[in-house]
Amino acid sequence: KDDPKNKNPKNPTKVSLNKETTITRIITDHYNDGNGDASGGTIMLKDKSGSIVGQWSARPAANKSGVANAKWICNPNVTVQPGTYFIHDSNPATWSKNALGVGFVEVIGIEK
């Protein structure tokens, strides 16, 4: 079961894109036992070879249940080619993970 109460992902968090895509938003989950994480931080995107595509400041926001600072949001507006990309979060200690040890993330974009 995927539960945001689990923290500190140990396995790579990745997204695979089939088309050239402009990534407009990346959101990581920092439920953190209901405390959120008000620090904000950075979200980084790396390509399959490990090269940094970009790193962006993330602002904390409430989740749908009203837990303050449970989501970290950045708006990269970066265009990437088809492929697999890895998401890194600057505070894995509060980043929620699923049963497979992968961080909770939403990647929103527009395919070209």
Image: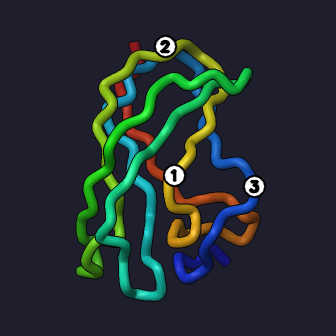
Name the image quarter holding residue 69.
Answer: bottom left
Category of crowding for the residue at label 1, using alpha-carbon neighbours closer than 10 angstroms: few (below 14), some (14–19), many (at least 20): many
3 to 80, vertically: above or below: below
What residue is shown at x 24% (from left), y 80% (from top)? 66
Residues at marks 2 and 1, CA–CA distance in whole angstroms: 23 Å
Name the image quarter holding residue 74.
Answer: top left
73 to 5, vertically: above or below: above
Question: Mark 3 vs mark 1: which is more N-terminal?
Answer: 3
99 to 104, vertically: above or below: below
Residues at marks 3 and 2, CA–CA distance in whole angstroms: 25 Å
Instruction: Name the residue beneath numbered marker 3.
Output: 11
Residue 89, numbered label: 1
Instruction: Name the residue beneath numbered marker 2.
Output: 20
Q: Where is residue 95? Give x, y as percent.
A: 52, 66
What residue is shown at x 36% (from left), y 37% (from top)? 56
What residue is shown at x 53% (from left), y 76% (from top)? 4
Pointer 2 and pointer 1: residues touching (CB < 8 Å)?
no
47 to 92, vertically: above or below: above
Q: Secondary structure at mark 3?
A: loop
Q: Where is residue 99? Give x, y as percent.
A: 72, 71
Q: Nearer the viewer, mark 3 or mark 1?
A: 1
Compared across the picture, whether 13 is left or right of 42 comes to: right
Q: Nearer the viewer, mark 2 or mark 1?
A: 1
Question: Hey, what amino acid is under mark 1?
Answer: Asp
What residue is shown at x 59% (from left), y 30% (from top)? 46
Question: Hey, what amino acid is under mark 2?
Answer: Glu
Q: Nearer the viewer, mark 3 or mark 2?
A: 3
Q: Secondary structure at mark 2?
A: loop
Residues at marks 3 and 1, CA–CA distance in whole angstroms: 12 Å
